[in-house]
Image (cartoon, rainbow, N blue to C red):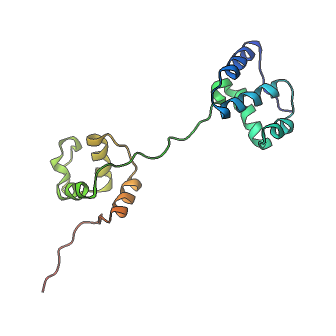
């Protein structure tokens, strides 16, 4: 049987956290640990909170390994930051050579996604992936490949 390992000091911290919890999901996690420490079985706890047995086991294992800190949700970083430049601003930027931007420290005459990524980070404090840049250009209808000379008759 799997139970939360709660000593006297941890019990006091757990009780205090339960009393002061403002978020319902956090309170539920704390109560799962509380009931488990009182030797309630995983399946019973899961039924009480309408959780899967695996979720209850996960909470208990995380608590046993890292205490209250280990029990906290580890949400992702969230949505990628949004590039705030307009289509016109991006088009104008692409008309300029990357070598004209001192912070890029490059002699490159043509843009690539890596240089655009560096530009956004250094001049606009926006950290984005190259795929986010590619997706933005596609959504805005800005061709990414270098302009080709037209063949006029």
Q: Eyeballing the image, is 16 above or below 131? A: above
Apparent side of residue 22 relative to residue 107 in the rendered image (left or right): right
From the viewer's side, name the closer residue of 106 and 20. 20
- Furthest residue toward left: 153
Apparent side of residue 83 relative to residue 42 in the rendered image (left or right): left
Residue lying at 69% horizontally and 29% vertically, measured from the top left: 27
Tell me how many marks there are: 0
Give the quadrant of the N terminus.
top right
x then y, percent, for residue 33: 76, 28
Residue 15, image quadrant:
top right
Q: Eyeballing the image, is 28 above or below 37? A: below
x then y, percent, for residue 34: 78, 25
Apparent side of residue 152 relative to residue 134 in the rendered image (left or right): left
Residue 49, image quadrant:
top right
- Furthest residue toward bottom: 153
From the viewer's side, name the closer residue of 113 and 16. 16
From the viewer's side, name the closer residue of 46 and 145. 46
Residue lying at 59% horizontally and 36% vertically, measured from the top left: 74
From the viewer's side, name the closer residue of 98 and 22. 22
Give the quadrant of the C terminus.
bottom left
Residue lying at 72% horizontally and 27% vertically, measured from the top left: 30
x then y, percent, for residue 52: 78, 44
Q: Eyeballing the image, is 41 above or below 12? A: below
Q: Eyeballing the image, is 100 above or below 94? A: above
x then y, percent, for residue 91: 23, 59
Residue lying at 50% horizontally and 40% vertically, measured from the top left: 77
Residue 13, image quadrant:
top right
């Amino acid at each position: 049987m799997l139970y939360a390992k709660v000593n006297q000091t941890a019990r006091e911290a757990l009780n205090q956290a339960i009393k002061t919890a403002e978020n319902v999901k956090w309170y539920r996690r704390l109560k799962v640990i509380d009931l488990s420490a009182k030797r309630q079985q995983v399946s019973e706890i899961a039924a009480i909170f309408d959780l899967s047995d695996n979720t209850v086991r996960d909470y208990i294992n995380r608590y046993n390994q890292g205490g209250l800190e280990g029990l906290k949700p580890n949400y992702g970083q969230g949505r990628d930051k949004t590039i705030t430049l307009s289509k016109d601003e991006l088009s104008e930027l692409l008309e300029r050579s990357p070598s004209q931007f001192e912070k890029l420290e490059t002699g490159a005459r043509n843009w690539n996604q890596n240089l655009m990524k560096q530009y956004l980070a250094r001049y606009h404090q926006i950290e984005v992936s190259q795929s986010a840049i590619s997706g933005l250009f596609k959504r805005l209808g800005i061709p990414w490949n270098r302009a080709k000379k037209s063949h006029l008759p």
